[in-house]
Image (tube, rainbow, N blue to C red):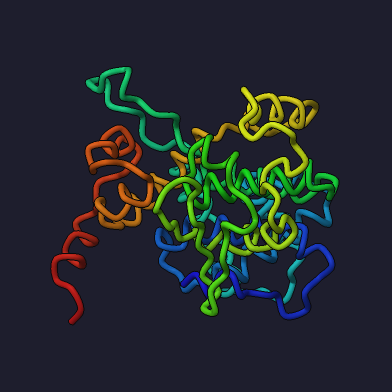
Amino acid sequence: MSGAILGYRPLEEPSEWPLVADGVRMVAAATCDSVPYPVPKVMLALSGIATFAERAGLPRDPLVWLAPGTITRYLLTRPALKGSTLQTYRCILLRVREALLWLQGGQQPTPKMHAARQRAAPYTPAELARFLMWARGLPGAPARGGSALALLALGAGCGLSRREVLAARGTHVTALPSETVVVAVPDSDRLVVCRAMWEEVLAERARSAGDEYLFLPQRQAAEPKNGITNWVDRIQRGSSGLPELKLARLRSTWIVELLRQRVPEDVVAAAAGMGSTAGLAPYRAWVAKLTQEATMRLLRGWA
C-alpha cells in the first residue's frame, strides 16, 4: 500500500504536482484504509483535486481541497467525467473527507485519566500535510527549511524525544538497499525504523547534513535550553493557518499512528524507548476500538 502511495505520479505530471504531492500522500496514507476504494483510484482523485486547488490559488490545506464547494468546482472542470464515473469521483472525495474529519476530531482523553498521565494530542493528517508543505516552502538554508523538515521527520516519522532530536546527526541515519530508513538513536542502543511517509524527507536531510546535526546544524551548543521551542516560535511567526509546531505532539502522532495500525504494543514501546507497554496507556485515548468486521478479520487470519 505504501508503495502505491509513495510511488504514485499523475500521468501528465502537471507543474503543480510537486507543490501538493506531500499533502496528497499524507492524506491518502491516513485515510485509504477507511474508504472502500482501491488506493490508485483514491490517489487519482486526490491528485486531481489538489492540482486543481493549487491552480485556483486555494490554500494548500487538504480540508480546503475536500470542501464540498471545491469538489463541485473541480468536477465541473472535468466534462469527460460522466455518469457513474463522475459519481465515483464524488463519492471517493466525500468519503476521504469524512475519514479526514473523523481523524481531525479524534477522540478526547478519558475523563478518568489522571492529568499527570495525559499526553499531548496527536496532529491530524491534514495538519501534518500543511506542516510538510509549509516546511517545503521555507528558504532552503539548512537553518530554516532543512531544520523544519528534520524536526517533522524525526518527530512524526521516528518519535524521537527532544534530547534525541538535538543530538541526531546525518551519520545516525542509514538508508538501506530496500529504501527503508533507520535511525541509530544517539546515546542508546535503539534502532528506529522511519515511517514510510517520512523516509525520503529524512534521507534527503541526512545526505545534506553529513556529520553535522540534522536540526540547526550550525548551532554552537549541543543541547541549547529551549532550543527547539524558541526556534519554532521564531520561524512560525507570521505563518497563518498553522497550528503551533510542538515536538511532543509530533511524537504523540507517531505513537498513536502505530497503535491505530495495530502494531504490537511491545514493539511500539521498545521503539519509543519506554521500559514497558504501560507507558502507552495515555495514548490509547486517541485509538478507536476495532469495528466488528476488522476484529473478525484479525481473528480469522489469512484464509
**Occupied quadrant, residue 279:** top left
Residue 230 in view (yes/no):
yes
Horizontally, residue 175 falls left or right of residue 211, namely left
Q: Classify 262 as above or below 112.
A: below
Residue 261 at x, y percent in the picture: 35, 56
217 or 221: nearer the eye? 221
Residue 151 at x, y percent in the picture: 62, 43
Q: Classify 132 as above or below 47.
A: above
Residue at point 73% right, 44% down? 217
Total marks in image:
0
Residue at point 57% right, 60% down? 173
Horizontally, residue 195 falls left or right of residue 229, namely left
User: Which residue ends up furthest to the top in the rendered image?
Assistant: 115
Residue at point 33% right, 28% down? 109
Residue at point 76% right, 59% down? 52
Q: Classify 72 as above or below 67.
A: below
288 or 120: nearer the eye? 120
83 or 140: nearer the eye? 140
Residue 272 at x, y percent in the picture: 38, 46
Residue 1 at x, y percent in the picture: 46, 72
**Occupied quadrant, residue 170:** bottom right
Residue 91 in view (yes/no):
no
> The C terminus is located in which quarter?
bottom left
